[in-house]
């Protein structure tokens, strides 16, 4: 366990100045700030909207963007960025000679990538709530303060995080095996398009088993839960967690065999 925490700490120090780390902070800040600016400039258009509807429109824009395209591609980028430091410095062999188990190093890298995705989702929820309440102060005609959706918004973003775990596991493994950034990025891009088609356009009944369809399906399922609260563990989320765990375990044995060659 000590080796795991040392490896996790090492990942933070190695990546804290990289674009991968800062993208987890800047992406939610940029998107929510732009949405806020749009609502600020068009406040007269939304002045007659009830508070609940106002929150749904305001929070729905970044949620729709993340569920459909941005989250899968962000996860692809994060998965590669965590391993790119070793790829660029060619330090994999040196890393595996350290007196720390390969399992501790492998799992620490994965958990660190997972924490970056979770941080991004958490910041989306916090910034959405913060900017919404700021708008109600700057533009009193926008009645954001008349309705509270803090719990629901945190649940939704946590659901998105869970729905991204299978993509993270797959892309994490690919980024370990491939030094070239274009290969895992290409798989992620094509997978995101196919996943969107299967879940959104084709509405394939088994799309919940496709990793790149799961974030979109988790957002689409919210409409069916409107009057029943937020169900975190819908079938696409459970499939994402199960597939992610299987790929994570398989990935360790694949990387272990590769590392001793």
Image (spheres, rainbow, N blue to C red):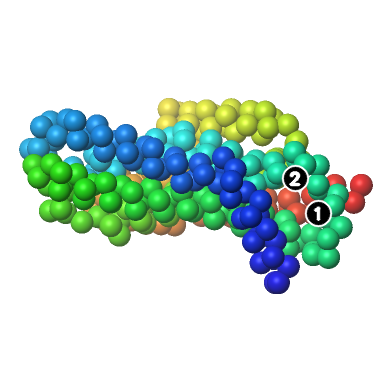
Badge 1 density bin: few <14, some 14–19, many ≥20, Cα 10 Å: few
Q: Residue at x 29, y 36 (%)?
A: 35
Which quadrant holds residue 47? top left
Placement of the N terminus among the 4 image quadrants = bottom right
Which residue appears farthest toward the bottom when viewing the image? 2
| Residue 114 in picture, x, y percent from top left | 57, 53
Q: Are marks 1 and 2 in contact (CB under 8 Å)?
A: yes
Determine whether 130 is above or below 189 in the image: below
Q: Residue at x 8, y 42 (%)?
A: 141
Disc sitting over residue 2 in the figure:
none
Residue 46 appears anywhere in the view: yes
Q: Earlier in the sequence, mark 1 or mark 2?
A: 2
* Image side of residue 186 versus residue 158, left or right: right
Q: CA distance from mark 1 to mark 2?
A: 8 Å
Disc sitting over residue 86 in the figure:
2
Q: Residue at x 41, y 53 (%)?
A: 122
| Residue 165 in picture, x, y percent from top left | 56, 50
Q: In this view of the protein, which residue sits in the foreground, 69 or 16?
A: 16
Q: In this view of the protein, which residue sits in the foreground, 223 or 14?
A: 14
Q: Residue at x 63, y 28 (%)?
A: 186
Determine whether 246 is above or below 140 in the image: below
Local SS, label 1? helix
Local SS, label 2? helix
Residue 216 appears anywhere in the view: no
| Residue 40 in picture, x, y percent from top left | 19, 35
* Image side of residue 17 versus residue 221, left or right: right
| Residue 31 in picture, x, y percent from top left | 37, 37
Which residue appears farthest toward the front when viewing the image? 17
Badge 2 density bin: few <14, some 14–19, many ≥20, Cα 10 Å: some
Disc sitting over residue 95 in the figure:
1
């Amino acid at each position: 366990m000590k080796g795991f925490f040392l490896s996790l700490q090492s990942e933070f120090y190695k990546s804290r100045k990289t674009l991968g780390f800062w993208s987890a902070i800047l992406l939610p800040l940029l998107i929510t700030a732009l949405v806020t600016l749009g609502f600020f400039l068009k406040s007269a258009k939304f002045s007659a909207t009830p508070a609940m509807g106002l929150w749904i429109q305001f929070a729905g824009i970044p949620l729709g963007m993340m569920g459909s395209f941005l989250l899968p591609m962000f996860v692809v980028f994060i998965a590669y960025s965590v391993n790119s430091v070793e790829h660029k410095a060619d330090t994999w062999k040196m890393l595996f000679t350290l007196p720390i188990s390969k399992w501790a190093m492998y799992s620490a890298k994965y958990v660190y990538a997972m924490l970056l995705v979770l941080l991004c989702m958490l910041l989306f929820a916090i910034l959405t709530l913060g900017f919404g309440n700021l708008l109600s102060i700057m533009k009193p005609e926008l009645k954001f303060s008349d309705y509270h959706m803090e719990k629901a918004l945190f649940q939704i973003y946590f659901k998105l995080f869970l729905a991204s775990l299978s993509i993270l596991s797959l892309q994490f493994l690919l980024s370990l095996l491939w030094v070239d950034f274009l290969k895992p990025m290409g798989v992620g891009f094509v997978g995101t398009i196919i996943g969107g088609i299967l879940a959104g356009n084709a509405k394939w009944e088994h799309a919940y088993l496709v990793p790149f369809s799961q974030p979109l399906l988790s957002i689409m399922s919210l409409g069916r839960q409107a009057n029943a609260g937020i169900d975190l563990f819908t079938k696409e989320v459970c499939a994402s967690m199960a597939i992610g765990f299987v790929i994570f375990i398989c990935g360790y044995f694949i990387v272990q065999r590769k590392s001793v060659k």
